[in-house]
Amino acid sequence: MSSFTSDSYLGVETRNRLQLLTEWLSATDVRITAVGDVDMSTAHEFSDYVFRRAGNCKRLVLDMTLVSFFDCAGFSALQYIDERCRTAGVTWLVQPAHSVTRVVDFCEPRSGLPISTSGEFESACA
């Protein structure tokens, strides 16, 4: 899933560090998949994408199982998403990669973020 852009005039190759995909499961249920790094340089892009793509949903699943790197900025993005979802009455769930779980546990073990341990996406949007 990696995409590369070659800047041949600079002799530098850059890679998109975060890829995001939206899948509407029904008229009100959406799954957003994140692949790559959610860190200080991509956390704002991540949360903006979630708000733009899931703006009218009632149920949201964030599939973060393919996140390879996650830091405290990513944790802050999840807290912001949580705040906005609570305000809008959106039920949401995070399906985490190990890197996500590790940072969430470290930053605030009792954060109250809806972190799934079952691995079942469909039950989250049923």
Image: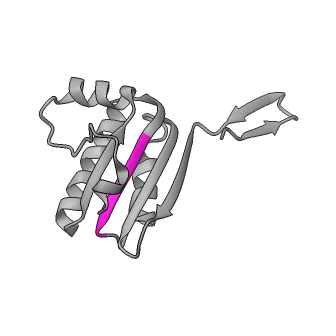
Q: Is 14 a magenta residue?
A: no
SS majority, magenta: strand
In this picture, is 22 found above or below 45? below
Which quarter of the rendered picture does the N terminus lie within?
top right
Taking the view exactly as shown, the residue that stands out farthest to the bottom is 27
Q: Which colour scheme is used?
A: one colour
Front residue of 23/79: it is 23
Front residue of 113/11: it is 113
User: Residue 46, position in %: x, y?
Assistant: 44, 48
User: Residue 73, position in %: x, y?
Assistant: 35, 36
In this picture, is 67 found above or below 81? above
Rendered residue at 42%/41% (across/down) = 64
Rendered residue at 36%/51% (across/down) = 121
Q: Is residue 125 left or right of residue 70?
A: left
Q: Can residue 22 be seen in this view?
A: yes
In this picture, is 92 found above or below 14? below
Rendered residue at 27%/50% (across/down) = 80
Count of all numbered marks drawn on residues in the image: 0
Which quarter of the rendered picture does the C terminus lie within?
bottom left
User: Bounds of the magenta span?
Assistant: 58-64
Q: In this view, does 44 lie to the left or right of 124?
A: right
Residue 105 appears in which quarter of the rendering?
top left
User: Residue 90, position in %: x, y?
Assistant: 24, 65
Q: Is 59 a magenta residue?
A: yes
Q: Can residue 45 be seen in this view?
A: no
Rendered residue at 49%/61% (across/down) = 23
Residue 86 appears in which quarter of the rendering?
bottom left
